[in-house]
Each structure stands twice: as C-alpha cells, then as structure tokens.
Amino acid sequence: MYLSTHTANAGPGFSWGPARPWAWFLYSVYFAAPFWPKIGLFLPLITLLVFSRLPRFREALYLLVLVAAVGAYYILGAADIRPNPLSAERSLISTGVAILFILPFFFITPHRTRSAITALMLGVAVFVLFEGVFTIYNYPETAIRRYMMHPILGEEVHSTGQINATALAAFFLIAISRKLVFGWIAWLVVALVSIAFQNRTGMLLSVLLLIFLLLKRQTWNIWQKFFWITTITSVIYLTYFLLVEPIVANPLARLMSEGLQTERYEIQLEGLKMIIQGRHLFGGGQLSGTADTFWYHNIFIDAYRVAGILGLVLFVAVVLISFLNAVESRSIEVFSAWVCAFALVCTSVVMEGFLIEYLATFSVFSYALVARSFEGRARWLAHVKESGVKIAPRMV
C-alpha cells in the first residue's frame, strides 16, 4: 500500500509547497513600486514573507535575524562605513539588495535552491575571471598594486576578497553541486587570478582545491593524478609567463619576499580587546592607526565597529543558526562548505566590499538551512525504501 500524506508529513516534518499566493502578489507589487514607497513596503513585506514560511520555523527565524543584522550594519552603522559613509538612501538600497539576493532561496524547493546557488557560484567565478583580465589589460598599474577594477562601477577592489570568494564558490561547486566540470572551471579561475595578482592565500587555496578535485576522481590511480597535476600546473604557468607576466610581475616574488606574514592578526587582536573592554558599545570603534586599513577583516568585529553590541549579537546569531543546521544536515560536504564560508567571513571585509563576497558566504550559510531539510528528506526516503513501503509519486 502507498504511504499516506499524513504519514509522509509526520515522517520528516517538512513543508514542500510554494509560498502563499498573497505573498507572491505583494512581492510583485514591491518591484513595481517607486523608490520611497518601495522602502516603506520593505520591512512589512519581508515580515509577511517570512511568516508565510513559519511551518519551517528555523528558516523564518534565520531570515528575520539576517534582515535585522544587515539592517543594523548598513542603516545604524551607515556613518561608520568605510572608506565612504553611506547616505540614508544608499544604506537602504544596500540593505534591500543584500536581503533580496538571499530571500528567494527559501521560497523554492531545496533541490532548486542547490541549482540556483550552483549557478550563482559559477557566475561568481566567471565574473572574477573577467574582472581580472579586464584589470590586467586596461589598468596594469592597478593590477601591480594587487587591486582589481570593477568593470561596471569603475571602482577599485582588493583582489584578496574576490579570489577568496571564488575559492569558496569552487569548493561549493566541487563538493555539493554534482557538476564537477563547474568545479574545474572555478578552480582554474582561482589559480590563474591568484598567480596574476600575487595573492598568497589564493595560491595556497588553489593547491588545496586541486587536491580535493583529484580526490573526487576515485577511479584515477596515483600516476593519472600525478600526470594531471603536472600538466595543469605547467599549462597555468606557461599561460601566465607568456601573457600576463610581461604586464604585471613575477607571481612568486611576493611569496618569496614576504612569506605568509600579515598585519591582519594584530588588527583583529586590537578589535577583540575593544569588545572585551566594552568600548564603543554603540558603534564608532574605528581603527586607531595600527595599520593602513579601515577594517578589522572580521565580520563580527566589523559589525561591532559600525553597529556596536547589537550588530555583533545579530551576526553571531545568524552564523550560529546556520552552524546548527549545518551540523544537523549530517553532510560532511555541507559542513565543510560552511567551515570555508566561516573562515572567509573571519578574514575578509564581507559587508563593505563588493557584493561577491557577501553572496558567496551567505549563500553557503543559507544553504545550510535548506540542506538540513534536503539531506533529512533524502535519509527519510532511503529509510522508507529499505522498509519496502511504496511512496505516491506526488510525494517524492
């Protein structure tokens, strides 16, 4: 006999239906509205959409806390955003854009969410490759300083954040997307751009990603893996020395001269002391000149810098909810991707850089919640299959 709908819902406890029609209607009205009415509708609309998902309570809670955290960062901390403080209009736009890129992931099925994030991660890799090539051939003086020129906004952005985001995208594509060719493409972007912009972290990550890629090919023997490592590395360096090196510089020059030395740890230590001592509880905790930077390169300390204790608590809550779901997904791939995203937010300027870093990290954090139900449903179906109970097609 077939498993009943009541038994199915009682099994994993999931809700797979679409959002309520009135929520989608309001969502459409929002995009058609002029700017200031749009801003006025933003928070009520977000609240309605979130409550339409209350059968999956953790996702609703996560979205509400994420909206509050991003709003606190960009609106309450607008005056402390660097290098240029945000105007009232820009802070509202930044908040809306950040939320609206993540929100759709929770209103489609988990399988489609994985496909959507796969497409987004591949887009990140392709964009960073284009950005790097565009900078090298049009702004070589910018590339020499290890910065990229945004091809649309015409503003400089440090290459480290872009490369780290691409490395995270590559890991997601390799571990979760099931499209290994996309992982190879993203890895190639990380390797080429890291060498071109003398990014030490990117070089190390490209080696680790290559090892992970080859480990995924269990059918290859050790000699095949050695052959491909040698061939791919040779092609990359040959391409670099023929096309890029005459314009930029020796790719290993910085690594040989500076090693892995960085001032970032000293900066973050100063930020931790600021939090422990309770200074700047309401924001405004700018760096005191210990380094030539505006940021602590840590999302929690930077949230405290611009929005005080409220910003810190909200971002800790967002990441903690995501972490608990990553653990409960019981998927080593999902948890590993979460760890990579966490490492990125702890070492980069995710909220005040360009959108790529934010998209890559918070897509992974958000996927942890979706994966919890996705992986749980997969285990439930496997259990049902082993028990010999038939499942109605509409329930699969």
Image (cartoon, rainbow, N blue to C red):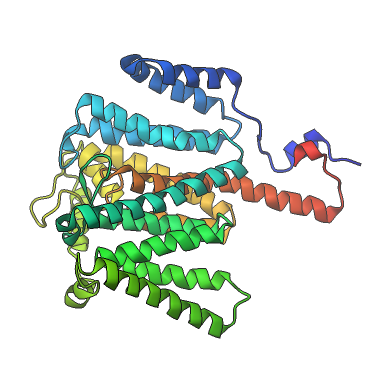
Quick check: can you spot residue 335? no
* Identity of the residue drawn at 22% across and 25% down: 88
Quick check: can you spot residue 283? yes
* Identity of the residue drawn at 36% across and 29% down: 96
Apparent side of residue 80 relative to residue 46 in the rendered image (left or right)? left
137 vs 385, nearest the viewer: 137
* Identity of the residue drawn at 19% across and 45% down: 278
Position of the N terminus by quadrant: top right
39 vs 180, nearest the viewer: 180
Asked if 45 appears above or below 57 in the picture, the reply is: above
Asked if 46 appears above or below 320 in the picture, the reply is: above
Apparent side of residue 362 relative to residue 3 in the rendered image (left or right)? left
Q: Residue furthest right?
A: 1
* Identity of the residue drawn at 44% across and 32% down: 64
70 vs 279, nearest the viewer: 70
Apparent side of residue 368 relative to residue 342 in the rendered image (left or right)? right
* Percent of width and height locating residue 34: 35, 15
Total numbered labels placed on residues in the image: 0
* Percent of width and height locating residue 108: 58, 35
The quarter of the displayed image where residue 285 is located: top left
Q: Residue furthest left?
A: 289
The quarter of the displayed image where residue 81 is located: top left
Apparent side of residue 155 relative to residue 104 in the rendered image (left or right)? left
Position of the C terminus by quadrant: top right
The quarter of the displayed image where residue 142 is located: bottom left
Q: Residue furthest front?
A: 242
* Percent of width and height locating residue 373: 62, 45
* Percent of width and height locating residue 221: 59, 82
